[in-house]
Amino acid sequence: MRDETFPSPIGTRQRFAGLLTATAIGVYLLIVLGATTSLTDAVSACSTWPTCSAPTDPLSQTELAVAWAHRIAAVVVGGFVVATAAVAWLGDTGRRVRYVLLVGLALYAVQVGIGAATATLGPAAVLPGLHLALGVSIFGAVVLALAWDLEAATGTDDGGIDRRVEAPAATDVDEPDPARIPREADHAPEPTRSLPTGRLARARLTGAAYLSMTKPRLMWLLCLVAAAGMALAAGPNLRIETVLATLGGGVLAIGASGTFNHVLERDVDRRMNRTADRPLATDLVPVRNALAFGVALAAASVGVFLTINALAAALGLIAILFYSVVYTLVLKPNTVQNTVIGGAAGALPALIGWAAVTNEIGLPGLALAGLIFLWTPAHFYNLALAYRDDYARGGFPMLPVVRGETVTRKHIVYYLAATLVGATGLAWLTDLGAVYAATVVVFGAVFLWAAVDLHFEQTERAAFRSFHASNAFLGAVLVAILIDALAF
């Protein structure tokens, strides 16, 4: 029997969540179109309202098309906002969902008035940035309604208690609970490894072990971040020698950070299924050798960065120390906010890329770093959900372990929305164009849909789908930055 808790044709909570998701995506598309209209001065090609009549000598047909697209999208999205608010008030939703959607609807009416004033009186008649700020506020209201309704519809009272170990009633959620650290019997079984007898086979195994310590799977994405920073700073004038030196130093820095992480977490790695076969956890590589390898990579990284400039070298060293010491030793084992604060490690390559070109830290570089910082929790919380039991076994206070899966899924939506706002801010501060805008909207919609689907499916498979959607989003956005910055 279907749970008909909303008026037809919505009917069910899952369909209402779909309507909220579509509305959020529509509002975000309108924000991007509005930013594009402003940046291309397309508003000058359409000086009447509500229809769009071009002046005698329009700036270009492209700008006129952009202005028309913005007007049409505003009508369609407005219909979604009205419909969503109406369904919420007629259906079985919580009070805060209803009222936040009502606020969004009121702001949308104000936004229409601001748009009319901008079109008829000119951009100078409206406070700069007001139109964008209102759009972001409407988007925030719809996303809050979505997250709260998903929590009510799919949430469970898991409370962050480990499924194997009963936690005390009173605990500081920001500190790891000793009761959640498993007994010896709960540890992952010690992996058995039979070493090959031939010299060549042993050399290959050892080489593979050292390579795995550098965490090569992280390199492609972090190198893309640095490359995007360089492209934003230099545009088509980017020099190949700067790219090679920056990416070379970055690869060495990532390798050093990963190696130190393997050394410092070797005991915990033995307790976790997903890390029990790491080289230091299985004593395949001696600790002393791994430390020497990490120090050599770090020194080489700083040396390569110094061929560019001292600021890039300093930022590279800070990235190594932050990930190896601050994140691995301080944040990860001690606070539920480890993933949030630790996002600074992934954001630093953006600043390194910008500094490699400009020898300074500029606002667009900071905006790109902010985008990566906001994306990290939305990305990594999916992995934390998939490996919740493993992190509990390792004693790490990850958000799903400490506060539960319901809160974690809600925070994925929060941080994804913040990431999309950050992506809009980056476009506002730079000359990024249509390729970037379209990529952010399309891949942002895919990521948001995967995150919403995770609320209803609540399986490891769904968590990995959302995780891969987050990777696809950032990878595509970074490639779009490269295309827009270097080719146009």
Image (tube, helix red, strand yellow):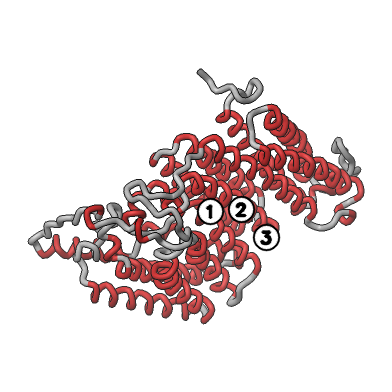
Residue 432 image-quadrant placement: bottom right
The x and y percentages for residue 397 are: 41, 58
Q: CA distance from mark 1 to mark 3?
A: 15 Å
The x and y percentages for residue 198 are: 9, 62
First in sequence, mark 1 or 3: give its number. 3
Which residue, given by chain and number where applicable, does mark 1 sit on? 479
**In percent of the image, x 54 and y 60: which residue is there?**
373
Picture mark count: 3
Q: CA distance from mark 3 to mark 2?
A: 19 Å
Left-right relation of 15 to 111: left
Residue 418's label in the rendered image is 2
Mark 2 neighbour density, 10 Å: few (under 14) some (14–19) many (20 or more): many
Say whether residue 254 is visible: yes
Mark 3 neighbour density, 10 Å: few (under 14) some (14–19) many (20 or more): some
Q: CA distance from mark 1 to mark 2?
A: 20 Å
Which residue, given by chain and number where applicable, does mark 3 sit on? 430
First in sequence, mark 3 or 2: give its number. 2
